[in-house]
């Protein structure tokens, strides 16, 4: 049984371990190995502590916790960081939230934890007044793209490039109505 709740200070190290291992697992063969090998749980933990303690942060963090109380997944979401233009059913411009990051312990992928976290992020985005959600995914990360497409996301044609150890990788923006 998985329980989803707000992330707190005690979850930071576990979330950082999930994020680093998640990157190293999901992006193997996509992101340069040198970049992945340079990632550390300690470095990510320090960054996450700063982010969580920021007094005016606009994003939210949720964790998935298993029956033993272990943190096994994490999602971060909030207002869209880029301009997303789409009309809603009434013709008015929709207000977009964004899923910034979603990671599950690599050994637990495919067990519904990510879907549960994403579903709860959608519920909370809707409560905050957002009508739609966007996210960015590496074009070559086919597994993640399939996961998000099954959750109702579709590519909208927007792309952006990120550079990892001098290798440029393209991200696609996906979006869905909440």
Image (cartoon, rainbow, N blue to C red):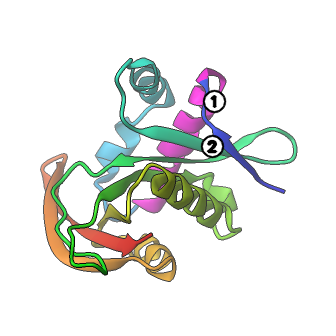
> What residue is drawn where x is 61% and y is 27%?
8
**Image side of residue 3 versus residue 26, left or right:** right
**Neighbourhood count class around disc 1 (C-alpha, 10 Å): few under 14, some 14–19, many 20 upward:** some
Classify mark 2: helix, strand or loop: strand
Q: Which residue is mark 1?
A: 11
Q: Is residue 32 visible?
A: yes
Judge whether 122 appears above or below 100 on screen: below
**Image side of residue 168 versus residue 45, left or right:** left
Judge whether 97 appears above or below 65 on screen: below
> What residue is drawn where x is 57% and y is 37%?
15
Q: What is the quadrant of the N terminus in the image?
A: bottom right
**Neighbourhood count class around disc 2 (C-alpha, 10 Å): few under 14, some 14–19, many 20 upward:** many
Viewer-proximal residue, 172 or 61? 61
Classify mark 1: helix, strand or loop: helix
Q: Which residue is mark 2?
A: 63
Residue 75 spot, x, y in % from top left: 52, 49
**Image side of residue 2 versus residue 85, left or right:** right
Q: Which residues are magenta?
A: 9-27
> What residue is drawn where x is 38% and y is 17%?
55
């Amino acid at each position: 049984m998985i329980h989803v709740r707000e992330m707190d200070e005690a979850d930071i190290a576990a979330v950082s371990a999930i994020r680093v291992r998640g990157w190293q697992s999901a992006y193997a063969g996509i992101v340069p190995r040198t970049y992945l090998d340079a990632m550390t749980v300690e470095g990510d933990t320090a960054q996450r502590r700063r982010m969580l303690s920021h007094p005016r942060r606009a994003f939210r963090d949720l964790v998935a916790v298993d029956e033993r109380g272990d943190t096994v997944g994490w999602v971060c979401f909030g207002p869209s960081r880029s301009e997303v233009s789409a009309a809603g059913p009434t013709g008015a411009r929709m207000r977009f939230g964004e899923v910034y990051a979603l990671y599950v312990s690599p050994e637990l992928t495919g067990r519904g934890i990510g879907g549960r976290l994403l579903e709860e992020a959608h519920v909370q985005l809707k409560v905050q007044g957002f009508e739609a959600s966007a996210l960015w995914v590496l074009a070559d990360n086919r597994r993640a793209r399939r996961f998000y497409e099954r959750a109702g996301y579709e590519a909208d044609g927007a792309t952006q490039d990120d550079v990892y150890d001098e290798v440029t990788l393209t991200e696609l923006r996906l979006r869905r109505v909440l």
